[in-house]
Image (cartoon, helix red, strand yellow):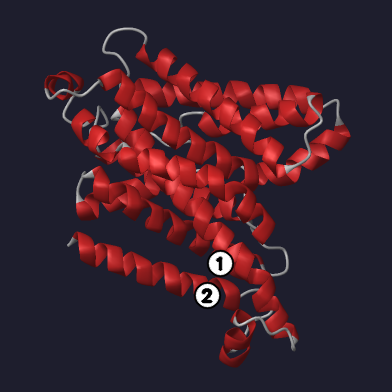
């Protein structure tokens, strides 16, 4: 079953990739599609294919990073509601980028990546600490509430910093929406080392996450260093989320929806869940980008808006239908 799901996801990602370079303001025929993929730009349609290719790959890479980050965060917190958006991680990265733009004069993607990862890490730690206070420890509901409150507070700080600075607000506004329209080969090459490092850390933590899923006491009884395992796995998720957010803006709900669907299809083994969440995230974000272009016409809708439209009802369904105490 898991192998079949993996093959189906690979096929879906490939088909969505073809759709991404085919559909838009200018639709592309098969001959121009093949010619454009091979590098020809003799016609407008072929040039459109060449221009859309880095955007397509960018959407796949960012979607995969967010899907894996969500799977890891859900495993670390044993929280089915864990998601970079819901837990305030995206808001932490956003605030860090604003501080970098306004006070540090940052204007390049590599600068955004470093400060976004720091901001994401600080926000993740803060939300987990606040959600752990009181009786019962870090329950899913307390973490979700702490994340929501933190997101609102950090969003207010972002507004307070930007309102008196119109020029900086203009620079931040396009980034804040969250989308893949600005994806280039240079941006992909810049983010790829960080994303690869986060992926390796997350993949290396798969067995530890399986142990944590049994409960802290049982995991410790099996010889697992629970604190170390959580810290290492969380590092992988934060690096993935921070780097993806830095170059694409805050895109929500990919890390919530995808791991849930994959878990329903293949089970809770993180050795499968992590790579399949990557494929699912790539499919969801690429598909959202295609839908945004088709629905919006000449004024395309950013992929982050489409994922929010899909993810918000999914979040409500999880809260209503699941017993959201722990995984």
Q: Which mark is residue 281?
A: none
Asked if residue 217 shows in the view, the reply is yes
State the separation of the CA atoms marked 1 and 2.
7 Å
Image coords of residue 58 (percent x, y): 58, 58
Please say if the residues under marks 1 and 2 sit with CB atoms less than 8 Å apart: yes
Residue at position x 50%, y 71% in the image = 17
Q: Residue furthest bottom?
A: 31
Residue under pointer 2: 19
The picture places residue 134, in percent across and down from the top left corner, at 33, 7
* Residue 268 % position (x, y): 21, 44
Figure disc tally: 2
Q: Please give the name of the residue rendered at 34% of the width and 52% of the height, measured from the top-left corner.
A: 275
Q: Which residue is mark 1?
A: 290
Residue 188 picture location, percent across and down: 61, 55
User: Label 2 neighbourhood size at 10 Å, few (<14), some (14-19), many (20+)?
Assistant: some
Q: Quadrant of residue 109?
A: top right
- From the viewer's side, name the closer residue of 131 and 247: 247
- Secondary structure under tag 2 reads helix
Name above or below for residue 190 compared with residue 74.
below
The tag earlier along the polypeptide, 1 or 2, is 2
Query: Seen from this angle, which residue lies furthest top?
Result: 134
| Residue closest to the eye, 198 or 183 | 198
């Amino acid at each position: 079953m898991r192998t079949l799901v993996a093959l189906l996801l690979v096929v879906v990602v490939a088909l969505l990739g073809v759709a991404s370079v085919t559909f838009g303001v200018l639709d592309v025929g098969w001959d121009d599609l093949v010619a454009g993929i091979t590098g020809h730009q003799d016609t407008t349609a072929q040039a459109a294919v060449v221009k859309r290719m880095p955007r397509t790959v960018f959407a796949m890479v960012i979607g995969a990073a967010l899907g894996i980050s969500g799977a890891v965060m859900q495993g670390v917190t044993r929280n089915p509601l864990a998601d970079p958006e819901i837990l305030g991680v995206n808001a932490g990265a956003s605030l860090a980028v604003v501080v970098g733009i306004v006070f540090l004069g940052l204007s390049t993607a590599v600068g955004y990546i470093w400060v976004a990862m720091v901001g994401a890490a600080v926000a993740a730690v803060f939300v987990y600490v606040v959600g752990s206070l009181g009786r019962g420890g870090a329950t899913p509901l307390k973490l979700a509430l702490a994340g929501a409150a933190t997101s609102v507070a950090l969003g207010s700080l972002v507004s307070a910093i930007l309102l008196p600075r119109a020029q900086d607000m203009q620079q931040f506004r396009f980034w804040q929406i969250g989308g893949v329209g600005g994806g280039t080969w240079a941006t992909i090459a810049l983010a790829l080392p960080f994303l690869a490092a986060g992926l390796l850390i997350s993949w290396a933590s798969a067995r530890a996450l399986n142990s944590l899923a049994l409960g802290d006491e049982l995991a410790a009884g099996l010889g697992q260093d629970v604190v170390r395992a959580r810290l290492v796995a969380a590092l992988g998720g934060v690096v993935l989320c921070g780097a993806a957010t830095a170059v694409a803006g805050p895109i929500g709900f990919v890390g919530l929806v995808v791991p849930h669907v994959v878990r329903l299809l293949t089970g809770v083994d993180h050795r499968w869940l992590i790579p399949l969440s990557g494929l699912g995230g790539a499919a969801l974000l690429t598909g959202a980008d295609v839908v945004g272009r088709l629905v919006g016409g000449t004024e395309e809708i950013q992929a982050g808006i489409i994922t929010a439209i899909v993810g918000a009802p999914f979040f409500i369904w999880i809260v209503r239908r699941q017993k959201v105490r722990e995984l």
